[in-house]
Image (cartoon, rainbow, N blue to C red):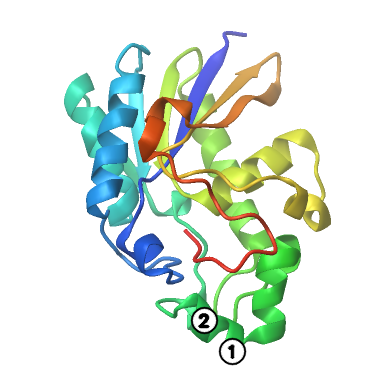
Amino acid sequence: MKKTTVYLMRHGQSESNLAKCFAGQMNVHLSELGHKQAEVTSEYLKTIPVDVIYSSDLYRAYETAQHTAEKKGLPIHTSPKLREIFAGEWEGKSTAELAEKYGEGYDAWKYNIGAVQTPGGESVKQVMERFVPEVERIMRENEGKTIFIFCHATPIRLLRAAWEGVPLENVKDIPRVANSSVTHGEYSDGAFRIVQYSYADFLGDLKVEPPRDGVKEGAK
């Protein structure tokens, strides 16, 4: 079996990240910093040969992908299954408002993300069940190729949990990924594995450390 390689990039800083709001599947654009991060990421990826580029269809991921796709001269294939969590009533609300109105539920997001069921939206388990099979489908359909996927923080974190056999109750122990970071995975001999997770040192002064679980901060 040929080795299949995937690079998963979280989008650059979005307008909702900047405003400390929970975007979920709201269609928000990249911030000015986000575009700068996406451009530096595209420079980092320029030397990595790629066969196909996929992206979440949400603006912030697609706009990040555009910086790289233009350099590679490749089209961007979109999939709604690569989206961030649909957060229902939480979407568009500030982290301060979430803490005030949804105290216990929002605490779970900060301290025990694997147990989260967003009100009127998806559970984290449901995100895993749509995102992980989609990435694996893309990899199997592109056997032996190198794939770029531009997407979001929670799904990448859940992909690592799935591939490393981490139960949902322990996802909180997997760090969040940084904006415009690169996660490298492989599929060979019937197994998926993470090679490098949330690498972003190439961003230099543009790197923004993601919030740690237990710290009040906007999501995705």
Farthest bottom residue in view: 101
Q: 162 or 217: nearer the eye?
A: 217
> Residue tagged by mark 1?
100
Q: Residue 36: x, y in percent?
A: 25, 40
Q: Residue 62: x, y in percent?
A: 28, 46
> Residue tagged by mark 2?
96
Give the amino acid type for the residue marked by disc 2 in the picture. Answer: Ala
Q: Residue 76: x, y in percent?
A: 26, 36
Farthest top residue in view: 2
Q: Residue 61: x, y in percent?
A: 34, 48
Residue at screen point 51% across, 63% down: 219
Residue at screen point 57% across, 11% down: 3
Q: Is residue 201 left or right of residue 39?
A: right
Please determine whether, in this image, residue 200 is positioned above or below residue 150.
above
Residue at screen point 82% across, 58% down: 169
Q: What label sits on residue 78 in the rendered view?
A: none
Examine the rendering and report whether any part of residue 75 can be seen.
no
Q: 133 or 215: nearer the eye?
A: 215
* CB-based contact (under 8 Å), mark 2 and mark 1: yes
Report, in whole angstroms, how far the alpha carbon at label 2 lies from the one at label 1. 6 Å
Please determine whether, in this image, residue 143 is positioned above or below residue 105.
above
